[in-house]
Amino acid sequence: MTRRALAIAAAAVIFAGGWLGGALTAQPVRKYFAATTAAVAAPAFSRAVLVGDTLYLSGAIGVDAERRVPDTAEAEAQAVLSSVQDTLREAGMTMDDLVSVQVFCSDVSHYDAFNKVYRTFFKKELPARAFLGSGRLLFGARFEVQGVAVRRSARRLGAPASSSATERESAWA
């Protein structure tokens, strides 16, 4: 084989390896958690999807099997956050594994009532969060909560505990 042919063959192998590399690399296993709510007869979604050590939570609402919303905002916040907690537990995680939470609220005047209950569900630092006024929610719910959790064992170890966001940020850099 000539030098030129050898160089072309080597380039082809390198190109193909880079081009096909993503297709040949093992992808994290996905585990789907079926929606088990009686409030929706045939849900068209998974309650959560675990990809590697990251759990993606679908929106959860705090209604009972008969689609009844609890009487108070606090009771509904307790119900919806308990539902999120149950899903996390099933995936081998806790509320402290949440890294991002989105709360959709039919009326932002429920902000304080939700926060009063929300804080009781965390032992450590709170996840990043958005609290959005969404208008009307399914079944007349006040709150819908979705989020992303990362298994703590998958996070980088050795970062010092700190009360300063800047110090924490540099520890993870």
Image (cartoon, rainbow, N blue to C red):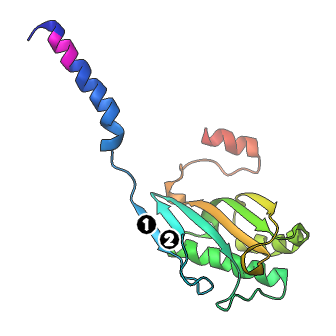
Q: Residue extending furthest right? A: 109
Q: Amino acid at mark 2?
A: Ala
Answer few, some or many: residues within 10 Å of disc 1's Cα (few below 14, many 20 plus, some between 14 and 19).
some
Q: Do callouts 2 and 1 mark residues in contact (Cβ within 8 Å)?
A: yes
Q: Amino acid at mark 1?
A: Lys
Q: Which percent across, then down, holds residue 102?
A: 71, 61
Q: Which percent across, then down, holds residue 77?
A: 77, 77
Distance from Cα at disc 2 to Cα at disc 1? 9 Å
Q: Residue at x 26, y 19 (%)?
A: 11
Q: Which residue is mark 1?
A: 31
SS at badge 1: strand
Query: Quadrant where the C terminus lies?
Result: top right
Query: Quadrant where the N terminus lies?
Result: top left
Q: Which percent across, then down, holds residue 160?
A: 64, 48
Residue 96's quadrant in the figure? bottom right
Is 83 one of the magenta-colored residues? Answer: no
Magenta part of the chain:
5-9
Q: Residue at x 30, y 25 (%)?
A: 15
Q: Residue at x 45, y 57 (%)?
A: 52
